[in-house]
Amino acid sequence: MLKHIDLSSVRYVNKQQRLRNAAEGFMGGLVANGFRGPWRWSNLDWELPFYRVWRDWPPPRRDPKSFPRFELGGHATSSEAREMLWQLKRTSPFHCFRNEPLPLEPFGLTPVEYLEIWAKGATSDEWIALAANFLREVNDK
């Protein structure tokens, strides 16, 4: 099972923890929006739409230690969006996102319950809105 890290109580959150948090929130939001997968987009197809919705998304209370900074050609203080998906390890209910449908009940929870417990820095509604905007962007192509 995914190790739960309460980012609000941690003084320093490393880049991988921020990326994992974003990945769990994003994937949970996709499931809440009815996306079942598997992931059907190449990096070229999904990254630019993701950058657009991420840039326009920030929740009002966005805590910088909960979220990675995404930029094309990421560097030491930023990441490319694909790095976020690399953080979906075997301990995540979404780790097989490229080959299998996403779980309807991650860890036996509804997608909203999952987001409330496992994705920090934004409300479940905010994560769901991010994913909905992403799905609109990639489906409009």
Image (cartoon, helix red, strand yellow):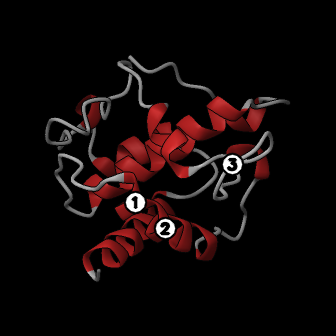
The answer to whether mark 1 and mark 2 are in CB contact below 8 A is yes
List the residue tagged with mark 2: 48
Q: What count of labels does the image hold?
A: 3
Amino acid type of the residue that numbered disc 1 sits on in the rendered structure: Leu
Circles 2 and 3: CB atoms closer than 8 Å: no
Q: Mark 1 Cα within 10 Å, few/some/many (few <14, many 20+)?
A: few
Tell me where residue 97 appears, x and y as whole percent.
Answer: 26, 38
Q: Dot 3: within a 10 Å radius of its alpha carbon, few (fewer than 14), some, or many (20 or more) residues? A: few
Across and down, in percent, residue 60 comes to 70, 71
Query: Which residue does the image show at 54% across and 24% down from the upper left?
Result: 4
Q: Residue at x 70, y 34 (%)?
A: 15
Label 3 belongs to which residue? Answer: 74
Q: Is residue 69 visible?
A: yes
- If you read the primary sequence from the N terminus, does the residue marked by circle 3 or circle 1 appear first? 1
Element type where label 1 sits in the image: helix
Residue reaching furthest bottom? 140
Relative depth, front residue between 131 and 52: 52
Give the position of the N terminus as an image quadrant. top left
Q: Secondary structure at mark 2?
A: helix
Disc 3 residue type (three-letter): Gly
Task: Let me know if residue 116 appears in the view.
Answer: no
Residue displayed at 31% across by 70% down: 135
Rendering coords of residue 89 (x, y %) = 41, 23
Q: Which residue is mark 1?
A: 44
| Amino acid at pointer 2 | Leu
